[in-house]
């Protein structure tokens, strides 16, 4: 191993693949009905101190309903990673839910600007952070999904991100070239939002999966929220779209519009007005407290939140704006 670059970041989850494989070996593979409410799901599968991986990418196909419930139930001291985490990160920050974070892209909401509240939270120094690129964070899930303690890569080499990551420089045993080893990331809980699932957890998406295919295979517990519950025969019509088979999934939550106010490809477009409302509220902490109380803490569930934002009428408008159409 070369000592040219010593990475200074912290590994928040053990990359011990043998220990993880033993956990997965004990996990039930029974094909049972796993449909339950969002509230019960979060209560059963997300515990203070857990490490949580958020699926989707940017503001696309994020599991907003599950994340709101994590905030509503006041979960604390979580670890968190998101693949270009934008509104999902913003929600978790609003609840001050996590104290450690694997960061590939955070604080920003892409073309919408930087989240003032996320920036304040990260600048408190209360959150331990380890840096990654989007690719290397995704490959950490992939290493875990493959049952390996790490994956070799060329990415990060020659950058300051390597210094702030937890990757290690290694020498290839075949060619002698210098590479970096990316430690496997085994989240306690992986959360993804999908287009359809059956009650057993067979889950499908339309379009690209980004890192979600690996997240559901790397995570010890998997929560799926879905736009629609369908019969298993519907899943079997096109198994190539199945992101997660039932034996990986612990809970299935039927949440129409569960990715709102983010974008759900082929379903509804992002609510840019509401995302702008979030950003404006975040400029002042007292205003933000009132905003979060109104939309999360004082609502019983995600349906009440949607009703506050215009319910089916607003969702119809966002459906009309969605540019992707099924053929």
Image (tube, grey):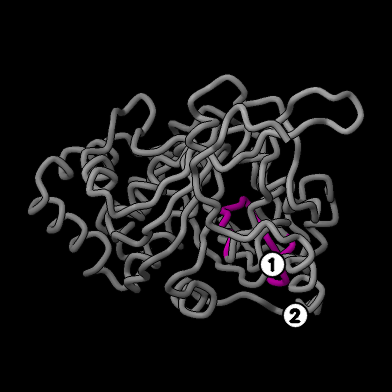
Give x and y (percent) for residue 170: 73, 34
The quadrant the C terminus occupies is: top right
Q: Who's the residue at 47% across and 54% down the image?
A: 80
Q: Which mark is residue 304?
A: none
Magenta stretch holds residue 146: no
Is residue 158 left or right of 24 when viewed as pictured?
A: left
* Above or below, 54 relative to 114: below
Give x and y (percent) for residue 68: 37, 61
Is residue 185 left or right of 277 when viewed as pictured?
A: right
Q: How dense is the environment of label 2, judged by Cα within 10 Å: few (below 14), some, or many (20 and up)?
A: few
Instruction: Residue 319: tell me if it is visible.
Output: no
Q: The magenta stretch spans which residues?
A: 189-202
Q: Which mark is residue 249?
A: 1
* Above or below, 16 relative to 93: below
**Outermost residue, top side:** 158
Q: Which residue is mark 2?
A: 32
Give x and y (percent) for residue 321: 43, 31
| Element type where label 1 sits in the image | loop
| Element type where label 2 sits in the image | loop
Which one is closest to the eye, mark 1 or mark 2?
Answer: 1
Contact, mark 1 vs mark 2 (Cβ under 8 Å): no
Give the prevailing secondary structure in the magenta stretch: strand
Is residue 286 left or right of 163 when viewed as pictured?
A: left
């Amino acid at each position: 191993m070369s000592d040219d670059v010593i990475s200074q970041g912290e590994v928040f989850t053990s990359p011990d693949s043998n220990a993880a494989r033993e956990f997965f070996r004990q996990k039930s593979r029974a094909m049972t009905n796993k449909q339950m409410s969002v509230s019960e799901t979060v209560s059963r599968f997300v515990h203070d101190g857990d490490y949580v991986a958020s699926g989707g990418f940017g503001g696309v196909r994020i599991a907003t309903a599950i994340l709101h419930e994590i905030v509503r139930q006041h979960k604390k001291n979580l670890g968190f990673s998101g693949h270009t985490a934008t509104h999902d990160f913003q929600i978790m920050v609003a609840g001050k839910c996590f104290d450690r974070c694997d960061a590939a892209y955070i604080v920003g909401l892409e073309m919408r600007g930087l989240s003032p509240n996320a920036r304040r939270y990260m600048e408190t120094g209360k959150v331990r952070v380890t840096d990654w690129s989007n690719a290397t964070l995704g490959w950490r899930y992939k290493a875990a999904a493959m049952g390996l303690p790490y994956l070799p890569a060329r990415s990060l080499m020659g950058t300051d991100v390597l210094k702030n990551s937890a990757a290690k420089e290694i020498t290839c045993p075949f060619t002698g070239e210098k590479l970096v080893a990316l430690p496997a990331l085994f989240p306690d809980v992986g959360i993804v939002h999908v287009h359809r699932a059956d009650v057993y957890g067979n889950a499908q998406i339309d379009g690209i999966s980004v890192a979600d295919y690996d997240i559901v295979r790397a995570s010890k517990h998997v929560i799926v929220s879905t736009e629609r519950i369908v019969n298993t025969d519907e899943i079997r019509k096109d198994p190539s779209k199945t992101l997660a088979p039932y034996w990986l999934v612990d809970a299935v939550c039927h949440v129409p519009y569960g990715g709102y106010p983010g974008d759900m490809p082929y379903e509804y477009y992002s609510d840019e007005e509401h995302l702008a409302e979030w950003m404006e509220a975040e400029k002042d902490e007292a205003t933000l407290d009132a905003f979060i109380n109104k939309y999360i803490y004082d609502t019983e569930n995600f349906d009440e939140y949607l009703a506050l934002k215009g319910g089916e009428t607003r969702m119809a408008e966002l459906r009309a704006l969605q540019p992707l159409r099924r053929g």
